[in-house]
Amino acid sequence: MKITIVGSGYVGLVTGACLAEVGNQVLCLDVDQSKIDILNGGGIPIHEPGLLEMVRRNRAAGRIAFTTDTAQAVAWGEVQFIAVGTPPDEDGSADLKYVTAAARNIGRHMDGFKIVVDKSTVPVGTADKVRAAISEELARRGSKIDFTVVSNPEFLKEGVAIEDFMRPDRIVIGATDDSHGQRACQVMRTLYAPFQRNHERMLFMDVRSAELTKYAANAMLATRISFMNELANLAERLGADIELVRRGIGSDPRIGYDFLYPGAGYGGSCFPKDVQALARTSETAGVPSRILEAVEAANEEQKRVLARKVTGFYGADLSGRTFALWGLSFKPNTDDMREAPSRVLIRSLLMAGASIQAHDPVAMDEARRVIGLDLQDRPELIAQLRYCEQAEDALQGADALIIITEWKTFRSPDFVLVKERLKDGLIIDGRNLYDPTVVAGAGLRYAPIGRPGNP
Ligand SMILES: NC(=O)c1ccc[n+]([C@@H]2O[C@H](COP(=O)([O-])OP(=O)(O)OC[C@H]3O[C@@H](n4cnc5c(N)ncnc54)[C@H](O)[C@@H]3O)[C@@H](O)[C@H]2O)c1
């Protein structure tokens, strides 16, 4: 099938590559010329395990191509996936300007029936706006071409995006209850057939329910995290061990083990903005959500937990102190720095006078870019932040090590070397990676989240 993907970021590129991998002919559009240049040069603009090889393979086979030419992209596929960003607006609601621009472009250039698929995470009612934008453009041209808008939210997780797309838990399709909607459901069934050979994973529903499903999923997961973070803070105060509590509740099948890890707060391109957007939607609809407001507030607070631990040890003035920082991306296996808790920590340590020696296996280039932007108001602080190619180099001469992203390579460090290199022999662990007794056995001090350590 000929498919167009509008927006070649984390979601668009993975979607395009996976659809090409099973034999479709995919044309990916982006407005960002530099991204398209990288893709046409045989690279990819993001870090996602397995994606580079998949894109290269399918590009070589002629099944995937990249362009900035909107007219060509609209003409290409009967199915047009919209996978552009939906960042938060000033009040936290989803900013739909990229989605409506993409829709307008489709309306401006389409010359035959199109199935327009909203894959971006968009608030309830967006399909109506996409439909209106396309209709307006068609009316401007005096054209009467049929089309339909489908909601097909994406549930992939960065870091395991290909696996998630290839073996999805579910494929949600929201379509209208008319002949065009039915045709779209048929096409979606054919398109997704290779991804559900083992058993049926498609859930067909009305468009609004599909749109809400995506927000409900992310909000539920974010709620679990914020709840565990609050419990961890309580456990710490009460002298209980959150890790044991986690196991104790996770064994209940109604609760389960997933998404029960306390830490330094959730980040990334989805949870923060989706929780906020759903909260704004609820408010606007006259059904304000106390839970979502609390989830967001608890997370903002949790992003400061590591800085609080640091000042607990060293006081508010950190001049002359140096901290090794392991991990910068918002989670492992990605270079995505959007809303990463590391950004909050770095800013507050630098503002308090500290120096930082940071290491991340893949996100350092992206970190340089975004932290440069974060510190535009205090550019003199940038000199206090040094990036180290090796994790061990970051330890040299530092007072303490702070862990903020749970990359696998941090899980089993050489504790003897860590002790040798750290002046204070202190690990502040924002991801509870280690067994406190092992760390203590190595003669190190240990401050995890919600667990008794030996600080
Ligand atoms: N990243 C994730 O893990 C994830 C998972 C599920 C859903 N989502 C949702 O998917 C959507 C996209 O997220 P992302 O992380 O891929 O964003 P992204 O920022 O990585 O990619 C979006 C791309 O769209 C391009 N773009 C913007 N306007 C355009 C236009 N008019 N025409 C063509 N291209 C245009 C941008 O240049 C950018 O490359 C968001 O709504 C997000 O919430 C993201």
Image (spheres, helix red, strand yellow):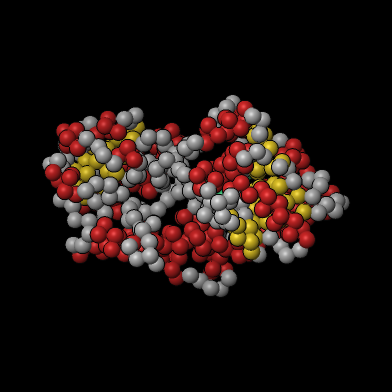
**Image position, residue 156 (x, y; %):** 51, 49
Whether residue 245 is visible: yes
Taking the image as shown, residue 410 lies to the left or right of residue 6, namely left
Residue at 51%, 71% (x, y): give it.
Answer: 288
Residue 85 shown left or right of residue 237 in the figure = right
Residue placed farthest to the front in the image?
198
> Residue visible at 22% across and 56% down?
451
- Counting labels gives 0
Indicate the position of residue 331 as horizontal and vertical percent values: 40, 45
Q: Position of residue 90 (x, y in %)?
A: 53, 56
Farthest right residue in view:
142
Say which of 213 and 86 sits in front: 213
The residue positioned 18% from the left and 44% from the top of the image is 439
217 on left or right of 455: right
Q: What is the quadrant of residue 449 in the picture?
A: bottom left
Q: Quadrant of the N terminus?
A: top right
Relative to 238, say whether 264 is above or below: above
